[in-house]
Image (spheres, rainbow, N blue to C red):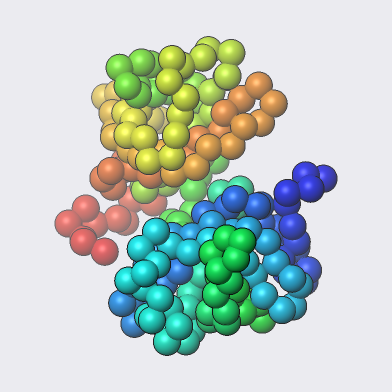
Amino acid sequence: MSNKNIELIDERNKIYVKTGLEMSLTAEDNSFCEKCTYVGQKRDQYIVVTPPPDFAGLENKLLQADPITVRYSFEGDIFEFSSKLMEIKYKPLMLLMLQFPDSIKKKELRSQKRICCFLSATMKINDETQDGIIKDISKFGCRFVLETSGKLEKPLRSNDQIALAFDFPGISDRQEIMGTIKDIRKKESRLDVGIEFARVAWWVPPYDWDPNRTS
């Protein structure tokens, strides 16, 4: 954590944030959910963020909302905390001062734990294919690792739509499934890609999953 743009925001839990990180601001009654960008902080006093794109139409709602739920993703994990709008700075740039959080919670998004594995797979994106390894998987997603030496013409981005094809132990047919890239981590000469499946992969254990269940 030597990068000077990365700041400690919760000393007890060792939670870090990076300048330029995207955050979401959500009202308790869900009357709005807007994006902003983390700028900085004064420890134990306030957090500084940019105003949402439609700030003119949201200003009164933001001032009246108490609390505001702030969420952000950092290194593949989701964090959230309660805050409120304390002040609006208009010069030299418009910035929002949010109350510094009492605590920050790490959210567990996976409804089922992933199974560690080592499966050869092919990912197709933008009419290009890339070989790699699935290193963990659940019914709802997986983590796909590929070497950066086999460069794609277009860089991978969050929310890109992809297709995976691979053989799964105990299943005779080759499995093909669509998905969405949720996060990308670069590790030395590899890309570590988190993927959310477009449908439930019923063939991944445990097998007590009811495919007709909607939630």
Asked whether the viewer can see residue 43, the reply is: yes
* Quarter of the view holding residue 190: top right
- The reply, left or right, for residue 69 in relation to residue 43 is left
Please state which of residues 121 and 155 is positioned toward the viewer in this rendering.
155
Task: Choose top left, top right, bottom left or bottom right for residue 11.
Answer: bottom right
**Residue under the image location 28 percent in, 47 percent down:** 200
Picture layout, residue 117 above or below residue 50: above
Number of residue marks:
0
Percent of width and height locating residue 160: 36, 35
Frontmost residue, 115 versus 149: 149
Residue 202, placed above or below residue 212: above
At which x and y percent is residue 116? Answer: 54, 40
Residue at 51 percent across and 25 percent down: it is 133
Question: Can you give x and y, in whole percent of width and height, for residue 153 in the image?
Answer: 43, 15
Q: Quadrant of residue 32?
A: bottom left
Q: Residue at x 39, y 23 (%)?
A: 123
Left or right, 16 with reference to 25: right
Q: Residue furthest front?
A: 91
Q: Residue at x 28, y 43 (%)?
A: 198
Viewer can see residue 49: no
Image quadrant in which the C terminus is located: bottom left
Return the x and y of residue 77 as percentages of the image width and height.
Answer: 57, 55
- Camera-side residue: 60 or 34? 60
Whether residue 118 sits left or right of residue 43 in the image: it is: left
Could you say which is closer to the camera, residue 36 or residue 116? 36
